[in-house]
């Protein structure tokens, strides 16, 4: 291959890599949407386990079939409250790859409000609390989904443009 052909191949690869990098950035935004959707479903299961099957809070959290809730439930030892267990696990859950790693501050505030009130009142108040937090997380999930869709196009386009710019500099 001559030098001109090598430059064209490199330019094509740079353009492709730029688009792939943009797509990767967009995928990170979609992860928040997934985590919020999983949380909404887990809250529904928690409500059933806690208020209909009348499981104690620790067992209800574990039985909700959501890894972060399982970790929080397992952390509820002795007289530790749901909030205490949540705060005990938050660093691990927020770490890269953790169950809450892609959530934003407003999402975390809703979760903190949930765990502040879990197990602190009667069944009707618990149902209202869970319903309120679930509604807030659904609203946040819809907004995150819309934002992720917009950013997916934006990041992919920007990556493609950056790759093309590098390719033009190379040629």
Image (cartoon, helix red, strand yellow):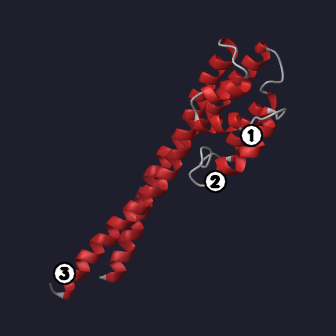
Would you call the spot at circle 1 few (<14 residues within 10 Å), some (14-19), or many (20 or more)?
many
Q: Are marks 3 and 1 in contact (CB under 8 Å)?
A: no
For residue 18, above or below residue 29: below
- Which picture quadrant has residue 142? top right
Residue drawn 42% across the image and 62% down it = 21
- Rounded to the nearest angstrom, the CA distance separating label 1 from label 2 is 14 Å
Quadrant into which the N terminus falls? bottom left
State left or right for residue 163 relative to residue 34.
left
- Work out whether residue 149 or residue 27 is closer to the camera in this orientation and state it: 27
Residue at point 38% right, 70% down? 163
Q: From the image, which quarter does the C terminus lie in?
A: bottom left
Please tell me how crowded label 2 is: few (under 14), some (14-19), or many (20+) other residues with Cα within 10 Å.
few
**Mark positioned earlier in the residue sequence (2 or 3):** 3
Q: Which residue matches tag 3? A: 5
Determine which residue is flagged by label 1.
Answer: 86
Labels 2 and 3 touching (C-beta < 8 A) = no
Q: Residue at x 63, y 39 (%)?
A: 68
Residue drawn 38% across the image and 76% down it: 166
Which element type, helix, strand or loop, lies under badge 1? Answer: helix
Q: Position of residue 132 (x, y in %)?
A: 71, 24
Residue 82, percent across and down?
77, 33
> Which label is found at residue 95?
2
Measured as percent of width and height from the top left, residue 17 is found at 36, 67
């Amino acid at each position: 291959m001559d030098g001109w052909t090598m430059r064209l191949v490199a330019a094509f690869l740079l353009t492709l890599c730029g688009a792939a990098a943009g797509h990767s950035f967009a995928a990170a935004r979609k992860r928040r949407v997934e985590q919020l959707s999983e949380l909404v479903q887990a809250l529904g299961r928690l409500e059933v386990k806690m208020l209909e099957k009348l499981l104690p809070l620790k067992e209800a959290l574990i039985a909700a079939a959501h890894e972060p809730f399982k970790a929080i439930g397992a952390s509820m030892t002795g007289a530790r409250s749901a909030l205490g267990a949540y705060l005990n696990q938050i660093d691990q859950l927020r770490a890269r790859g953790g169950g809450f790693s892609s959530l934003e501050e407003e999402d975390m505030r809703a979760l903190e409000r949930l765990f502040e009130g879990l197990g602190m009142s009667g069944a009707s108040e618990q149902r209202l609390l869970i319903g309120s937090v679930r509604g807030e997380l659904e609203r946040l999930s819809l907004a995150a989904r819309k934002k992720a869709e917009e950013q997916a196009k934006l990041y992919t386009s920007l990556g493609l443009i950056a790759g093309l710019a590098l390719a033009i500099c190379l040629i």
